[in-house]
Image (tube, rainbow, N blue to C red):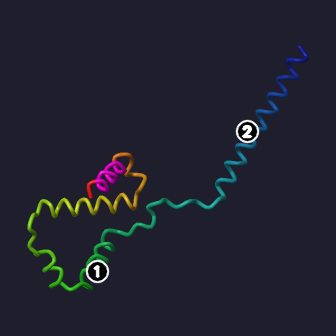
Amino acid sequence: MQPIFTTFKQILKQGILVVLLVSLINLAGWFLPSIQSSYAGVKSPAEELKEIRKDLAAQDPEQLYEEATKPIADPKMEAEKKYEANLDEYYKENPDKAGILGEAKQLIDKITE
């Protein structure tokens, strides 16, 4: 009967020790500085709109109009070229998103050029 009580006392002491350690870690977490969310630095839509307008005001409106209305021989091919350029730029910025299909497409493009 004595060994049962001894074992029970030892388990009780270890349980109390574990509870105290977990409580101490939790208490220490309260006093650590909080981490800001990843979206905390995002500007409001109004600020973004002001920035876009400021950028547009800095550019020459006549030149922008001429570039926008420049006649294109084949609009479908021009749109496809712009899409491919944007896609290539995206894959350069995010190489992990390209995956196997992106790499295969790049290989095919290199072969056909």
Q: Magenta: predominant secondary structure element?
A: helix
Gap in angstroms between the C-alphas marked 2 and 1: 59 Å
Image quadrant where one finds the C terminus: bottom left
56 to 109, vertically: above or below: below
The residue type indicated by label 2 comes to Val
Residue 74, horizontal then vertical, whole percent: 9, 64
Residue 58, horizontal then vertical, whole percent: 27, 85
Residue 76, horizontal then vertical, whole percent: 12, 59
Q: Quadrant of residue 56?
A: bottom left
The residue under the point 86% across, 20% down is 5
5 to 71, vertically: above or below: above
Count of picture labels: 2
The residue type indicated by label 1 comes to Asp
Magenta residues span 102-111
Q: Which mark is residue 19?
A: 2
The residue under the point 13% across, 80% down is 66
Disc 2 element: helix
- Per the image, is 113 magenta? no
Residue 105, horizontal then vertical, whole percent: 31, 50
Q: Nearer the viewer, residue 69 or 8?
A: 69
Q: Nearer the viewer, residue 40 or 60?
A: 60
Disc 1 element: helix
Q: Nearer the viewer, residue 60 or 47?
A: 60
55 to 34, vertically: above or below: below
